[in-house]
Image (cartoon, rainbow, N blue to C red):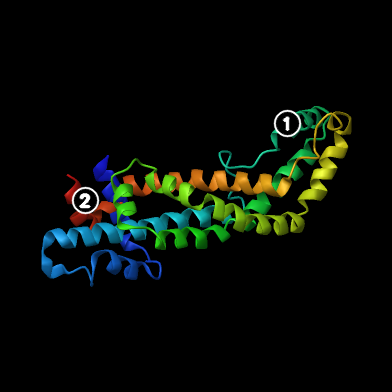
Amino acid sequence: MRKFAIALFALSAAGPTHAGLEDLLKGWLGGEGKEEAGAAALTEHEMIKGVLEALSVGVKRAVDYLGSKGGYLDDPRLRIPVPDPLQRVESLARRLGQGEYADQFIESMNRAAERAVPRAEEIFLDAIGKMTLQDAKAIVGGPDDAATQYFRTHTWDDLEAALLPVVAQATEEVKVTSYYKGFMDRASGLGKLVDTESLNLDKYVTREALDGLFLKLAEEERRIREDPVARTTDILKRVFATGK
């Protein structure tokens, strides 16, 4: 899989480079990449530049997808469901022909996530800017989701802290609490048997949104690594060859 790993980082050469990545690259390698030092130095320059650009491209694709209308709601793998403590309430509501109230509640949570997730891009890009050369090399030689694992380890806490207030505002705007109350009212008999006092909807939506974001990011990472179309680019041909 190493050649696919290198393909990942070469692919994004055709896309835009986030501001500051060239400066980071110069700091790692010195100067402008020192092409005069020979093919080996140039290959490392290309590979590392590809790492940074591919990470930026993958992040942007994932955030753009999830931040669009239906990004969460319309994707069964990413849709935020009713919280586990309320699954019995949802089941009862649907049996009583009140499924529309559950649907409204689910839609409102997913709309809140879609509004909040664009905030994640800045945090991801900041994490890219703090990467070391060793981090980049580990991602190159790692599994298909190595970059996603790196981001999950280094950004989760910052993402949760940043998205939570945005989610809180979004849940108010899309009336999550109102739909939640309507949902619970329609199944009040069973609802009384459910502990809802400890249920923090904003925190629940935030964490579910992040789980979906990392799932989508891993998908984008695999797609970028394996995209055969990208192998037609010049930088891919040069860097890809080093992995054979």
Q: Is residue 217 above or below residue 84?
A: below
Q: Which is nearer the eye, 141 or 179?
A: 141
**What residue is shown with label 1?**
87
Q: Secondary structure at mark 2?
A: helix
Image coordinates for residue 15, horizontal then vertical, percent: 36, 63
Amino acid carrying label 2: it is Phe
Q: Quadrant of the C terminus?
A: top left
Residue at (23%, 72%) from the top-left corner?
31
Residue 143 located left or right of residue 206: left
Q: Amino acid at mark 1?
A: Gln
**Quadrant position of residue 9:** bottom left
The crowding category of the residue bearing disc 2, from other C-alpha atoms within 10 Å (few below 14, some 14 to 19, many at least 20), is: many
Residue 27, given in percent of the width and then of the height, sits at 29, 68
- Numbered tag placed on residue 240 in the rendering: 2
Separation (CA) of disc 2 from disc 1: 49 Å
Q: Residue at x 10, y 64 (%)?
A: 38
Q: Secondary structure at mark 1?
A: helix
Residue 120 x, y percent position in the rendering: 54, 57
Pointers 2 and 1 in contact (CB under 8 A)?
no
Q: Is residue 220 left or right of residue 47?
A: right
Rendered-image quadrant of the N terminus: top left
Q: Is residue 42 visible?
A: yes
Mark yes or no: residue 233 visible: no
In this orientation, which residue lies closer to the viewer: 221 or 155?
155
**Image spot of residue 192 (x, y percent):** 87, 32
Disc count in the image?
2
Task: Report crowding for label 1: few under 14, some 14 to 19, many 20 or more residues within 10 A (C-alpha).
Answer: few
